[in-house]
Image: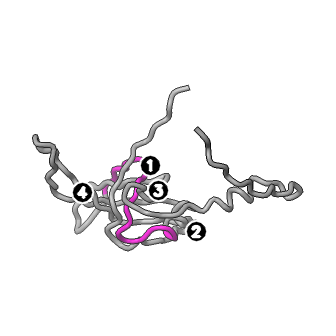
Amino acid sequence: MAIQTQESLSGFIATDPQLSFNSKGEARFYVRIAQEHFERNPDGSFTQGETTFHDLVMFRRTAERAFQMFAKGDSFVAEGYVRSFTFERDGQTLAGEEFVAKRLGHDSTRTAYAVDREQRRIQAVEPSTPVPAAQPVRPMSL
């Protein structure tokens, strides 16, 4: 089976996250994001170019979770797709685009964080199964 891929996007959150709900009660997460661009110089150093700003949205339960987890300034990595659209402003039809994120996580190369795996452990153990005691780790001998 072939590896399934999606478009990805990385950057940092440039505005305070917004959470709104449509008429069906479905959540929409919205932020402006920024991407810093760098050019590699012949000597191996880098020169920073212009920072660009874009829209990122998420929908439904993932939108609500993202709203709880992300704040302005957070570095992120997202998976999803670019959606182009048109809209009217002052009688003119304009074109726009946004990144629709299906998954959104903190960028581990720029963010220090702790992972809480306790919930996963609790779900993996059936209620009737006793939880085994932790075994001490023994140093490896060479």
Residue range of the region highlighted in magenta in the rendering: 67-86
Q: Nearer the viewer, residue 126 or 87?
A: 126
Q: Is residue 57 magenta?
A: no
> Mark 4 or mark 1, which is nearer the start of the sequence?
4
Q: Which mark is residue 104?
A: 3
Point 21% across, 59% down: residue: 51
Point 32% across, 54% down: residue: 97
Residue topped by disc 2: 25
Q: CA distance from mark 3 to mark 4?
A: 18 Å
From the viewer's perspective, is the residue at label 1 or at label 2 nearer? Answer: 1
Q: Tell me where residue 89 appears, x and y as whole percent.
A: 25, 66
Residue topped by disc 4: 36
Residue topped by disc 1: 79
Point 38% across, 66% down: residue: 74
**Residue type indicated by callout 3:** Leu
Q: Are marks 3 and 4 in contact (CB under 8 Å)?
A: no
> Mark 2 or mark 1, which is nearer the start of the sequence?
2
Above or below, 43 relative to 1: below
Q: Nearer the viewer, residue 141 or 32?
A: 141
Mark 2 lies on a secondary structure that is: loop
Mark 1 lies on a secondary structure that is: strand
Quarter of the image for residue 23 reads: bottom right
Q: CA distance from mark 1 to mark 2?
A: 24 Å
- Left or right of 44? Residue 112 is right
Q: Main secondary structure of the magenta part?
A: strand
From the viewer's perspective, is the residue at label 1 or at label 4 nearer? Answer: 4
- Left or right of 126? Residue 15 is left
